[in-house]
């Protein structure tokens, strides 16, 4: 690059900083926090390649290279862990991603303010319930012989004997995903509602003049306007494909569904953290993170190429 | 005869006094008052360790004050991480339930004082002698003695794990006898179910409740009806010194089929496979009983539940009852951290507690005058607290003993000075052991105790194999019991799968570890 152009670019950048120094000062605490708690500790990631002993510290612990990764990948359960983690994540994405968009579009199109507020409150509320309580509710609802659902079904003559949802390995993924959708539907729609509030009303007026119905305006005006938001959130979501929340999977596990409920995070907790094998659990998490990062970059590139919208 | 008895009692009294005097001549342990800080993990969330009166009593006797910081179970992970930093550690650790990995690292790094034979011989001779005579209690981590265990060698604690409890009230209401055979047992459970809503049997009755694959209130004792010993979720046992895996023992087929039958008849609930520990405890400790039969260490409701013997399968096989270990598999009930300025005094303290019957009684049972006192023969006689209400017991919290939350020894020396009233009380484990369960104890050493192979990589390999084997066994057996598979048709494939995932290697590694216990 030409030196003068480079010098100009730097000059322009510093001038902008000088002019908007209040904004950068506002940003500074967040940057410092990010640096201190996210970037600075990154040097610790090397324990994934060492046999970390707390009394030796990170730098003096023995270097073992890819030993922990090999151990993880040679596990009998490795394919199952990978399959469960990816299938739960993909299913959550397919089920949980479009619904908040649809909810946001529907709410945005609603005229009744009171109705809108009630729906918003009702859909947001589950987000604040703790995961432990959610799983407790699932157990109460679907308990095989004493659950609420089986009691209702038996009283209606629709069920004879136990309702084996919690005992069925195949049901685990559905319970996990749809309870997650119920929990986060309202909360996840907030971003889209916020994006929709930025749609120019003149576009809607023009649409009305042209005789467009509410549904048509929703589809041809609202939806395209929030595509950039959708794409960015989709990219971010793809970057967490390998991360299935430990808490809920762990709480929902039982002997009957372990073939479907054992994911990477639960395995890492039981075999790694609970047994103080920090190097091993770091290696597994690093494996996860690397795959997430590759996916993030790939999907970002694809999105930029296809839609012109991307995170960077 | 009377004269001989009186003389014997007098001699016993004199000997105990002499022993007590001899022990008390060691006091105070420290000439200057010293304070030691300690951590403890309050596993049962009872909140008795920090403000216990026992510490005041101990200070009075020994000139050593222990300041305890107690961590609840919700803080366990945080405690573990804090421990891992090896920073700001206390002087001593009582029961912490730390992973062996952390304990081993801390000891290797010099943060925990390794209790060598020489150190113990010089400052804790009672412990040194005891561990020498009881190698199974002397469990090392990477060849190092990290801490001291809690051992209770009374037979009714170690020699059987769970009472088999049947609802006697319901049996009486239905005019049924206590079952003694498996077929009678099934008939009784069926009667409980058929009479749901009659008398005190609730509509929501669960004839037989167990928590699947759990050593507490689980179904391992049903396997015992067929003479099979399974004590823990690893399903490992010792047979003539060899580690065996009961999960592929063909003898388990019959009890599994029996459990399958009970499930199909609706006599055991599907919730046995979905309940967690807290739910299991809630069910078995319900104020209004709604369970017909379950197993438990203690009888939560002696008014309604009666402890019964294992059932006879009438196949010629003698039923057995589960034993549990005499010592906890962890050895961290008394750890000395290297920042402790008073290592010798700390060792002398725990040695005195172990060797002194009064101190042992105070720390294991509870404070003298509140939980026990000397009887007319100078023996330690515990109070009968079984009739006390929950409120009355809670009021005694400051005087409560710590049990296995602090290292201790209750063996022959202690029990020679102990008047166990439990043997007179039909609801006490002591009486039950003597009168109901003793004849069902399996011969010899049957309990597998996990121990390190001495090689970190092999230990990790064993951990990985254990996880795979556990998952396959637990899931497959649960599927069979709930009728989602055919035991006979799938058995051979299941066994082969076990070998394919490394069962043979796993057993070799377990044997390697177990053998180290016997060659300490």
Image (tube, coloured by chain):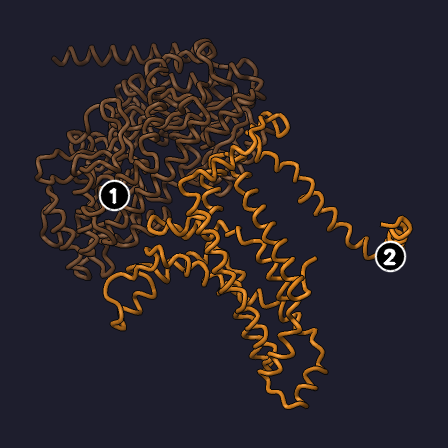
Chain colours: A orange, B brown
Q: Which numbered marker is on residue B493?
A: 1
SS category of the residue bearing label 1: helix
Task: Tell me if B18 is positioned left or right of B147 in this view.
Answer: left
Tell me if mark 1 has few (under 14), some (14-19) or many (20+) residues whose alpha carbon lies within 10 angstroms of its own. Answer: few
Q: Which of B299 and B113 is in front in this view?
A: B113
Residue drawn at point x = 66 percent, y = 70 percent? A195
Task: Tell me if B336 is positioned left or right of B469 in this view.
Answer: right
Residue B169 visible within the image: yes
Residue B293 position, x and y percent, is 21, 47
Residue drawn at point x = 15 percent, y = 59 percent? B194
Mark 1 and mark 2 on one chain: no
Badge nearest the viewer, 1 or 2 = 1
Residue drawn at point x = 22 percent, y = 39 percent? B221
- When asked about the image quadrant of residue B313, the answer is top left
Residue drawn at point x = 26 percent, y = 24 percent? B242
Instruction: Determine whether A18 is above or below A115 in the image.
Output: above
SS category of the residue bearing label 2: helix
Instruction: Determine whether B195 is above or below A41 in the image.
Output: below
Q: Which residue has dot 2 on it?
A: A16
The chain identifier of the residue carrying mark 1 reads B
Give the quadrant of the C terminus of chain B: top left
Instruction: Determine whether A168 is above or below B334 in the image.
Output: below
- When asked about the image quadrant of residue B35, the answer is top right
């Amino acid at each position: 690059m030409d030196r003068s152009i480079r010098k100009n670019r730097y000059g322009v950048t510093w001038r902008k900083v000088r002019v908007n120094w209040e904004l950068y000062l506002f940003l500074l605490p967040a940057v410092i926090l990010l640096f201190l708690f996210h970037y600075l500790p990154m040097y610790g990631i090397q324990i994934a390649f060492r046999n970390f002993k707390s009394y030796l510290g990170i730098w003096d612990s023995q270097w073992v290279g890819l030993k922990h990764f090999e151990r993880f990948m040679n596990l009998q359960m490795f394919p199952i862990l990978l399959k469960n983690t990816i299938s739960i994540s993909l299913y959550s994405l397919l089920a949980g991603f479009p619904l908040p968009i649809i909810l946001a579009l529907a709410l945005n199109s609603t005229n009744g303010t009171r109705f809108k507020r009630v729906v918003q409150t009702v859909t947001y509320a589950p987000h604040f319930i703790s995961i432990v309580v959610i799983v407790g509710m699932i157990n109460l609802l679907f308990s095989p012989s004493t659950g609420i659902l089986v009691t209702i079904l038996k009283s209606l003559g629709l069920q004879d004997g136990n309702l084996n949802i919690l005992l069925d390995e195949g049901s685990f993924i559905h319970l996990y995903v749809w309870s997650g959708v119920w929990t986060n539907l309202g909360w996840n729609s907030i971003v889209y509602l916020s994006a929709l509030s930025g749609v120019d009303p003149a576009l809607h007026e023009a649409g009305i003049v042209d005789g467009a119905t509410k549904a048509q305006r929703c589809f041809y005006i609202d939806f395209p306007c929030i595509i950039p938001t959708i794409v960015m959130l989709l990219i971010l979501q793809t970057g967490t494909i390998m991360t299935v929340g430990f808490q809920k999977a762990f709480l929902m596990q039982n002997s009957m569904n372990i073939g479907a409920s054992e994911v990477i995070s639960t395995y890492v907790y039981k075999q790694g953290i609970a047994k103080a094998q920090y190097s091993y659990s770091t290696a597994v998490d690093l494996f996860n993170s690397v795959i997430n990062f590759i996916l993030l970059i790939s999907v970002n590139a694809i999105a930029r190429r296809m839609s012109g919208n991307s995170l960077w | 005869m009377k004269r001989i008895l009186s003389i014997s009692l007098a001699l016993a009294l004199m000997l105990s006094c002499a022993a007590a005097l001899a022990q008390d001549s060691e006091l105070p342990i420290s000439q200057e008052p010293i304070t030691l800080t300690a951590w403890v993990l309050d596993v049962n969330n009872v909140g008795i360790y920090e403000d216990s009166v026992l510490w005041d009593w101990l200070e009075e006797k020994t000139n050593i004050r222990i300041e305890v910081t107690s961590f609840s179970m919700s803080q366990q992970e945080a405690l573990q991480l804090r421990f891992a930093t090896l920073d700001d550690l206390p002087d001593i650790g009582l029961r912490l339930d730390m992973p062996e990995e952390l304990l081993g690292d801390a000891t290797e790094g010099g943060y925990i004082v390794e209790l060598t034979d020489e150190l113990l011989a010089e400052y804790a001779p009672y412990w040194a002698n005891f561990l020498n005579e009881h190698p199974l209690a002397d469990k090392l981590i990477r060849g190092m003695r990290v801490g001291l265990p809690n051992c209770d060698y009374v037979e009714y604690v170690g020699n059987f794990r769970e009472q088999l409890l049947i609802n006697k009230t319901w049996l009486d209401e239905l005019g049924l006898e206590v079952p003694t055979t498996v077929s009678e047992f099934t008939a009784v459970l069926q009667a409980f179910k058929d009479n749901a809503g009659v008398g005190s049997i609730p509509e929501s009755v669960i004839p037989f409740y167990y928590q699947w694959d759990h050593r507490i209130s689980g179904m391992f004792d049903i396997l015992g009806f067929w003479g099979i010993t399974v004590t823990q979720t690893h399903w490992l046992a010792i047979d003539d010194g060899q580690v065996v895996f009961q999960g592929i023992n063909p003898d388990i087929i019959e009890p599994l089929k029996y459990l399958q039958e009970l499930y199909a008849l609706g006599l055991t609930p599907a919730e046995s496979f979905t309940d967690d520990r807290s739910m299991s405890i809630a069910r078995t400790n319900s104020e209004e009983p709604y369970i017909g039969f379950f197993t438990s260490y203690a009888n939560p409701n002696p008014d309604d539940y009666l402890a019964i013997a294992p059932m006879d399968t009438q196949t010629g096989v003698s039923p057995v009852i589960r034993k549990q270990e005499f010592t906890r598999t962890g050895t961290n009930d008394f750890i000395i951290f290297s920042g402790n300025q008073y290592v010798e005094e700390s060792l002398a303290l725990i040695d005195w507690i172990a060797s002194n019957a009064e101190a042992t009684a105070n720390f294991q049972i509870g404070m003298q005058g509140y939980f026990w006192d000397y009887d007319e023969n100078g023996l330690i006689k515990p109070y009968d607290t079984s009739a006390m209400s929950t409120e009355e017991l809670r009021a005694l919290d400051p005087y409560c003993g710590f049990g296995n939350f602090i290292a201790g020894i209750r063996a022959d020396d202690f029990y020679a000075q102990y008047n166990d009233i439990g043997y007179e009380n039909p609801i006490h484990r002591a009486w039950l052991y003597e009168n109901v369960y003793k004849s069902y104890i399996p011969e010899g050493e049957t309990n597998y105790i996990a121990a390190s192979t001495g090689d970190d990589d092999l230990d990790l390999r064993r951990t990985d194999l254990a996880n795979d084997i556990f998952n396959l066994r637990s899931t497959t057996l649960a599927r069979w019991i709930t009728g989602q598979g055919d035991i006979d048709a799938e058995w051979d494939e299941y066994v082969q799968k076990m070998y394919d995932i490394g069962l043979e290697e796993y057993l070799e590694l377990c044997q390697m570890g177990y053998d180290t216990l016997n060659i300490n």
